[in-house]
Amino acid sequence: MNTFESILEKINNTKNLDFGDILSRTIELFKKVWLQGFLLMVIFCIIMIPLFIAIYLPMYSALMEQIQNGGYNPENPSNLFSLQSDGFRYKIIGFAFVISFLTTALVAAFYKIVRKLDVGEEFSFSDFFQFFKAKYFDRIFAIASFSLLIALLNFAFEKFLPPATATLLNLLLNVILSVYTTLFAVFFAFNSNLKAGEIFSLSFNLGSKKWLLIFGLMVVAILMGCLGMIACGIGMLFTISIIYLPTYFVYKDVVGFNDVSSIDRIGIE
């Protein structure tokens, strides 16, 4: 199993990665894992729908109450939001934490499934829930807390800064950190023995070295994933999981896996 020191050494000694090569391999691998990616999106939907209902149902109830009392002005809906704006934002922050916790566990499991299919091993549906065990919760909690910190910063910007400035800072913050947060799940998936601080450190090291490459691959993958919108939007359930695959190949080419054969190591090390 890779140690923190061995992974860090590989990151520090990594060579240039080819954008086109990773993209082409991403497309080829997606042909193998699209069904598992679809199942991942279905699981996301099953989890998120009840959470969305819990968040927005109180707002809907307040709207219905205003309509019944004749106090709702469709030309000035801000009154509804002003009554519970802070409470609603706090709920959104809590919602973001719960979603981040569940997403980290599921996406990390998806990466392990991708690895299985990449080397020709069998897939089991129970693999999606392999990280829903108490021994992993401290690291998943730490990763989710990082997302919570981002949400709190976004909230603080909106609370204390002019709208235009807050929007710009939120955009910059989320764009810059998107690369690192994407790497968290990959490092956790294949190095669940590491501490949370070590996962963060390795993610920031690799992300800083390959930020432009990873971000560029993410943008292209998102565009390809959104092609599913052509099929009345429902098609995105089948295509959007491709966004996770470029990061898998970056990790594979830089760090590698202990289970690869000597032939597979040619061109990686």
Image (cartoon, rainbow, N blue to C red):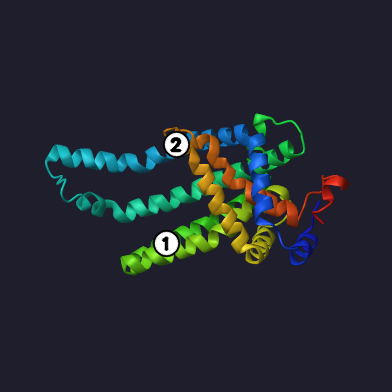
Q: Which residue is mark 2?
A: 230
- Residues 196 and 19: in front is 19
> Dot 2: within a 10 Å radius of its alpha carbon, few (fewer than 14), some, or many (20 or more) residues?
few
Disc marking residue 154? 1
Q: Label 1, secondary structure: give it.
A: helix
Q: Residue at x 22, y 41 (%)?
A: 63
Q: Residue at x 13, y 45 (%)?
A: 71
Q: Residue at x 82, y 57 (%)?
A: 269
- Residues 60 and 231: in front is 231
Question: In x, y percent, where is residue 9?
Answer: 78, 65
Q: Label 2, secondary structure: give it.
A: helix
Distance in Å between CA atoms under marks 2 and 1:
32 Å
Question: In x, y percent, where is residue 175?
Answer: 50, 61
Give the amino acid at mark 1: Asn
Q: Is residue 251 left or right of residue 238?
A: right
Lower sequence index among marks 2 and 1: 1
Give the amino acid at mark 2: Ile
Q: Is residue 261 left or right of residue 74?
A: right
Question: In x, y percent, where is residue 50?
Answer: 43, 36
- Residues 47 and 258: in front is 258
